[in-house]
């Protein structure tokens, strides 16, 4: 099982968290692969919003209180006294109804408490869960991102058109050796096309994909209806409004899964 980390050097412009949500949901819905999502970026909208919607937040919190399942914070507490194994991961995840997609509720701690030791243990424990694992990493570089760069299997670097620090990213060997690239919120009318980016930085065609901007996709996340949106999209026709978005997402998801070693995709 592989750990796939989504990261960007800048916040807010490339849609890192939404890109991860799109790819992971497509992975689960289209290929029926067991999929786990973990969010380390505290500034991002909680994963539960995309699957449960804001109206179910209180009910979700009550469920976790009843079963004593607290998500990422509980895993952190357990890691102080024992190895993170399959049971700990399983006890601290939510299964999205009618799917084999699981997510771990985000940390509610205000202070930064996670360290390199915990990151390494968490990644090893996630592999025990026997799933395709997606990690939403905090943007920029710090001690924790360095640990993820080192210990993750694949680093999905999220770019945006007109990005002014792309040279620095492309020259960092710690990034390039594991990296594949997504241009998020992609606009086909921009002068910074994916072909131009690919040629400028010598990126192979099978190592860069795009996820276009799509208002219906963003609405689906905010309304807690991401799974139905992706499911309907898979059966869309060329004349449908979301067809181009779904097709680009399909190609980008396949690119990432092939890099992760999943055959026949």
Image (spheres, rainbow, N blue to C red):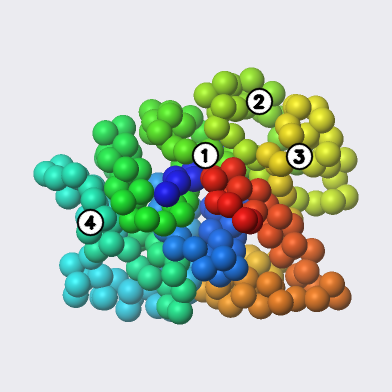
| Nearer to me, 146 or 238 | 238
Residue named by callout 4: 88
Q: Which of marks 2 and 1 precedes in the sequence?
A: 1
Q: Residues within 10 Å of mark 1 (few under 14, many from 20)?
A: many
Image quadrant assignment for residue 130: bottom left
Q: Nearer the viewer, mark 2 or mark 4?
A: 4
Residue 83's label in the rendered image is: none
The alpha-carbon separation of the residues under discs 3 and 4 comes to 39 Å
* Residue wearing tag 1: 154
Labels 1 and 3 touching (C-beta < 8 A): no
Q: Which residue is mark 3?
A: 205
Q: Is residue 86 above or below residue 222?
A: above
Tell me which label, 3 or 4, sits earlier in the chain: 4
**Local crowd size for mark 2, using a 10 Å CA cut-off: few (<14), some (14–19), many (≥20):** some
Query: Could you give the CA–CA distance between mark 1 and mark 2, rounded to whole angstroms?
Result: 16 Å
Question: Is residue 230 in sight in this rendering?
Answer: yes
Q: Answer with mark 1 or mark 3, whichever residue precedes in sequence.
A: 1
The disc placed on residue 170 is 2
Question: Looking at the picture, how far across and down is residue 84, in whole percent?
Answer: 23, 47
Give percent across and percent down for residue 258: 61, 48
């Amino acid at each position: 099982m592989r750990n796939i980390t989504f990261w960007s050097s800048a916040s807010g412009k490339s849609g890192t968290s939404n890109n991860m949500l799109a790819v992971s949901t497509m992975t689960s819905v289209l290929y029926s692969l067991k999929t786990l999502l973990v969010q380390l970026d505290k500034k991002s909208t909680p994963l539960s919003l995309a699957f449960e919607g804001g109206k179910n937040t209180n009910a979700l919190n009550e469920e976790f209180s009843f079963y004593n399942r607290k998500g990422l914070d509980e895993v952190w507490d357990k890691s102080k006294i024992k190895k993170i194994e399959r049971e700990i991961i399983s006890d601290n995840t939510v299964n999205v109804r009618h799917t084999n997609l699981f997510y771990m509720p985000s940390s509610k701690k205000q202070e930064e408490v996670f360290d390199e030791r915990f990151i390494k243990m968490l990644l090893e424990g996630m592999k025990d869960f026997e799933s395709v694992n997606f990690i939403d990493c905090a943007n920029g570089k710090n001690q924790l991102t360095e640990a993820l760069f080192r210990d993750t299997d694949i680093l999905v670097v999220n770019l945006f058109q007109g990005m002014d620090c792309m040279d620095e990213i492309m020259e960092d060997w710690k990034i390039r050796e594991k990296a594949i690239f997504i241009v998020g919120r992609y606009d086909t009318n921009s002068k910074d096309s994916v072909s131009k980016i690919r040629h400028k930085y010598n990126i192979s065609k099978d190592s860069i994909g795009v996820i276009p901007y799509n208002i219906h996709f963003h609405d689906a996340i905010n309304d807690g209806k991401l799974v139905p949106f992706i499911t309907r999209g898979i059966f869309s026709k060329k004349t449908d409004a979301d067809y181009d978005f779904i097709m680009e997402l399909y190609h980008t998801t396949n690119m990432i899964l092939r890099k992760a070693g999943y055959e026949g995709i």
